[in-house]
């Protein structure tokens, strides 16, 4: 069986500093995969390389056997909240219509089919009543639904969601997990990055543990073993019986987490 998404030996560096190191990952058609790793693990970098926003130094990405950016096989990407400029003065309907731009014909003007796709996406996310509102005025959960609607309006084969559970409340998170259930029936391949290991372990059939390298990939029970978690999180992971507590408090202060606080050395580790 050919993989829907194939990453082969993907290596990305920023100014010579490695962010991803020879990551090889094959995702079958229709699968839903949680990409888990600490801050700075390279999750966002992985997604940007998958949509062709970043060019890898080594290796490649193939979607249905083709390089990213091929319009006949759309990959929809919802960036992490912090990467979106919420002051941009556009309405909800405008944002969702942006999902159709890759499909607009030579006329570059939305046709009936585009307006229908937008209306369907607004309905699917229950935000049709917000269509005329500027996105900057909405709550975090509503804004997330707008960007999900934009992604669905694209009628994607692959959907990449970068940290969608971060900064939204429990009900928005459940709504999103419900949407993923619906998408499972629609044969859309989904990758979701998160540092929420519990959600990854209980709500996804496949998980990938990443920290620059791919540490483990497969069914969650085989991925989230103490050995793998320790490798991915180092001193940030604390095991309490069956539970693992991961300190995500201070990006840039890897090693200054729970394990360090309990060690009483008082020494600052280099970041
Ligand atoms: P994650 O999404 O898992 O938190 P990222 O992919 O954002 O990780 O970042 C991976 C590494 O690459 C981090 O060390 C980060 O500081 C670095 N990085 C990310 N984007 C840039 C950039 N535009 N320029 C330089 N370094 C970057
Ligand atoms: Mg990120």
Image: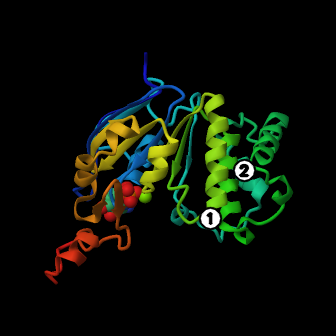
Question: What residue is at 39 percent from the left and 50 percent from the top?
Answer: 36
The residue drawn where x is 49% and y is 50% is 199
Whereabouts is ligand 2, in terms of quadrant?
Answer: bottom left
Which quadrant does the N terminus fall into? Answer: top left
Drawn side of residue 42 relative to residue 53, left or right? left
The answer to which quarter of the image holds residue 233 is bottom left
**x, y percentage for residue 193?**
46, 50
Q: Nearer the viewer, mark 2 or mark 1?
A: 1
User: Percent from the top left, x then y, of residue 256?
Assistant: 25, 74
The quadrant where residue 62 appears: top left
Which labelled disc corresponds to residue 116? Answer: none
The answer to whether 235 appears left or right of 137 in the picture is left
- Residue 201, visible in the rendered structure: yes
Q: Nearer the viewer, residue 97 or 248?
A: 248
Can see residue 39? Answer: no
Disc 2 element: helix
Quickly name the residue at label 1: 169
Q: Identify residue for label 2.
A: 96
Residue located 76% across and 66% down the image: 134
Residue 261, image x, y percentages? 24, 77
Residue 217 screen position, x and y as percent: 34, 37
- Secondary structure category for the residue under label 1: loop
12 lies above or below 140 = above
- Whether 29 is drawn above or below 74: the answer is above
Ligand 2 is within 8 Å of the C-beta of the residue at disc 1:
no
> Left or right: where does residue 267 sit relative to residue 133?
left
């Amino acid at each position: 069986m050919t993989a829907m998404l194939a990453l082969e030996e993907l290596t990305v560096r920023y100014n010579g500093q490695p962010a991803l190191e020879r990551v090889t990952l094959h995702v079958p058609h229709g699968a839903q995969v949680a990409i888990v790793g600490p801050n700075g693990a390279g999750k966002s970098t992985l997604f940007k390389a998958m949509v062709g926003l970043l060019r890898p130094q080594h290796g490649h990405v193939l979607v249905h056997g083709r390089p990213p950016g091929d319009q006949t096989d759309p990959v929809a990407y919802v960036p992490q909240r912090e990467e979106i400029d919420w002051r941009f003065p556009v309405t909800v309907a405008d944002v969702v219509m942006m999902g159709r731009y890759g499909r607009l014909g030579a006329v570059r003007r939305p046709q009936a089919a585009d307006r229908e796709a937008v209306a369907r996406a607004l309905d699917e996310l229950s935000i049709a009543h917000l269509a005329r509102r500027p996105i900057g005025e909405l709550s975090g959960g509503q804004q997330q639904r707008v960007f999900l609607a934009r992604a669905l309006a694209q009628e994607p084969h692959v959907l990449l969601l970068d940290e969608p559970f971060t900064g939204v409340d429990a009900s928005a998170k459940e709504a999103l997990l419900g949407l993923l259930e619906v998408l499972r029936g629609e044969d859309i391949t989904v990758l979701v990055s998160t540092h929420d290991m519990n959600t990854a372990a209980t709500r996804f059939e496949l998980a990938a543990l990443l920290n620059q390298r791919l540490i483990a990939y497969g069914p969650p029970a085989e991925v989230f073993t103490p050995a793998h978690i320790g490798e991915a999180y180092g001193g940030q992971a604390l095991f309490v019986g069956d539970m693992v507590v991961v300190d995500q408090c201070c990006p840039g202060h890897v090693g200054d987490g729970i394990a360090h606080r309990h060690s009483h050395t008082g020494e600052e580790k280099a970041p």
